[in-house]
Amino acid sequence: MAFLARGGFLPVITPTLMGTGFILVGWFVDPLYGLAPGFGVLMLMLAAFFANFWRDPDRPIPRDEGVIVSPADGHVMFAKRERATGRRPSKEEMADAEEDEHTGTWHPEPCENPLSFSTEQRFEAVPEGEESDTDVWRIAVFMSPLDVHVNRSPIAGKIIRMEHRTGKGRKRGPFLPAFRKESEYNERVRTLFEREDGLIVEVMQISGALARTIIPWTGEGDELRRGERFGMIRLGSRVDVRVPASKFTPNVISAEDGHKDHPKGEFVKAGSTILYRGI
């Protein structure tokens, strides 16, 4: 059983002890014109906020075959079918690269096999009627400051790639609000999970306007179970998941679907909610 995520014990216990101490001093020694109990209550409120933020509840993990679970808690912003239109260039390809002031440097051709996700690629929405076997589905999950911020593995497999990208435009990259679609190029950590059968799932942990710290707990080469914890993003943020469109279909309702019962998109839980089902 896990009540607090890694690193959460000290931020919670410190203001708790301080608040309790100030209240006891104000009660038994001297209230200091009400400042001691007031400061004590403030510290306990801060401890409650930290406890809520660092909470890490256990989750039931689906055992269904051929499914991909959500890596994050939050509302589904959109589910979009996309195709690759470019990739990050190698040193040898820099001469032919295209420069974008907001998203950085791109080679105008995608990976030879776009579904290998061997490097970060540039994607665009697929117009209706132009679908192909190399398309991907992308589901974006918005995590508010009140949601659980521990991220979990979407499949059982090995981490074959984990890279940190700072974004472009500022010292540590732009920090657009995570609920905006353009925030996909904020500071981010891109992780590739590979299943035993060779399936690759791309998970992008994206920082938001407030959340500027992505904390990986695992690294390349680590084997994870489906739903196992692999990292955390502090405060509001976003997580995108890409899978081959030829093998999976979305299993959730997004905010763009206009569903009356889910105006913000369906709320999903890391490790428990099935994002994709196999075709």
Image: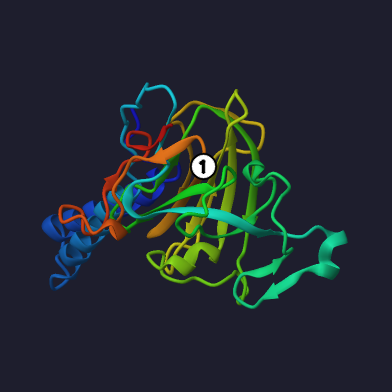
Q: In this view, does 116 lie above or below 254?
A: above
Q: Which residue lies furthest to the front in this view?
A: 129
* Of the pair 167 and 125, the residue shown nearer to us: 125
Q: Where is residue 238 in the image (x, y as percent from the top left)?
A: 42, 56
Q: Residue at coordinates 64% horizontally, 45% vertically from top-left?
A: 117
Crowding near the residue tagged with mark 1, few <14, some 14–19, many ≥20 C-alpha atoms within 10 Å:
many
Q: Quarter of the image holding residue 133? A: top right
* Of the pair 12 and 259, the residue shown nearer to us: 259
Quadrant containing the N terminus is top left
Q: Is residue 218 above or below residue 260?
A: above
Q: Residue at coordinates 64% horizontally, 78% vertically from top-left?
A: 101
Colouring rule applied to residues: rainbow
Q: Which residue lies furthest to the right in this view?
A: 92
* Of the pair 278 and 31, the residue shown nearer to us: 278
The residue type indicated by label 1 comes to: Val
Numbered marks: total: 1
Residue 233 seen anywhere in this rendered image of the structure: no
Q: Is residue 144 above or below residue 250?
A: below
Q: Where is residue 147 in the image (x, y as percent from the top left)?
A: 30, 51
Residue 46 seen anywhere in this rendered image of the structure: yes
- Residue to which mark 1 is pinned: 243
Quadrant containing the C terminus is top left
Q: Residue at coordinates 43% horizontally, 41% vertically from top-left?
A: 71
Q: Where is residue 260 in the image (x, y as percent from the top left)?
A: 15, 56
Q: Position of residue 89 (x, y in %)?
A: 77, 60
